[in-house]
Amino acid sequence: MSEVRVTRMAPGGMITLRGDLAETGPAAAAVTGAHVPEPLSMTGDATRGLGWMAPDELLILLPEEEVAGALHRLAADLAEVHHLAVDVSDARSRFAVEGRGVRDILQKLTPADLSPAAFPPGRLRRTRLAQVAGAIWMAEESRIEAICFRSVTDYVETLLRNAAEAGPAGFHGPL
């Protein structure tokens, strides 16, 4: 029996912000209170944070009820800046995968290197979760959050639960 738990997280607010991060980053930081992240990382926490998704893209995490206000503020703060800010809250699902051996559970589903050296806490990356696109964030040493398109939520949940049920595979050393 695995010591890893998979939880479908309650809906939360998510905004995709595209543009030159030198110009858009400060506005994103202002709506979240989180620092602009370095490449391949996340700042803040699961409720309010910023994730580096690409050289010109940030993922903004906020409470769902704050998304409309954040979009309005971004539009005002970036009125003179070429950008795109879109509410993707309804288009994404999130999972918390927690427990001892969490790296091994996710490693079964992704080609990404999840070794402690390559994927320390705070690291975020886009990848594949079996056959679908997703993103994973190493929130803590024993907690990874997975994000996927809402259309594949049930599939990803089944993948995660099956991988967790089978237990750690020992990819990243003894537990």
Image (spheres, helix red, strand yellow):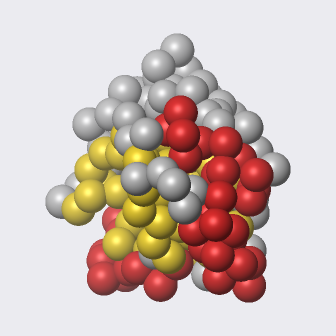
Q: Is residue 161 left or right of residue 71?
A: left
Q: State the image quarter where residue 20 is shown.
A: top left
- Where in the figure is residue 118, as x and y percent of width and height? 47, 19
Q: Is residue 44 visible?
A: no
- Where in the figure is residue 10, as x and y percent of width and height? 65, 80
- Residue furthest front in the image: 80
- Residue furthest left in the image: 131
Q: Is residue 160 left or right of residue 102?
A: left
- The residue sitting at 18% across, 60% down in the picture is 131
| Residue nearest the viewer, comparing 69 with 152 | 69
Q: Relative to 151, does residue 146 appear above or below in the rendering? A: above
Q: Relative to 87, does residue 51 appear above or below in the rendering? A: above
- Where in the figure is residue 114, as x and y percent of width and height? 44, 30
Q: Relative to 39, does residue 27 appear above or below in the rendering? A: below
Q: Is residue 112 left or right of residue 61?
A: left
- Look at the image and tell me in which quarter the C terminus lies: top right
| Residue nearest the viewer, comparing 47 with 17 | 17
Q: Is residue 54 visible?
A: yes
Q: State the image quarter where residue 129 is shown.
A: bottom left
- Look at the image and tell me in which quarter the N terminus lies: bottom right
- The residue sitting at 42% across, 56% down in the picture is 83
- Residue furthest top in the image: 117
Q: Relative to 12, does residue 122 appear above or below in the rendering? A: above
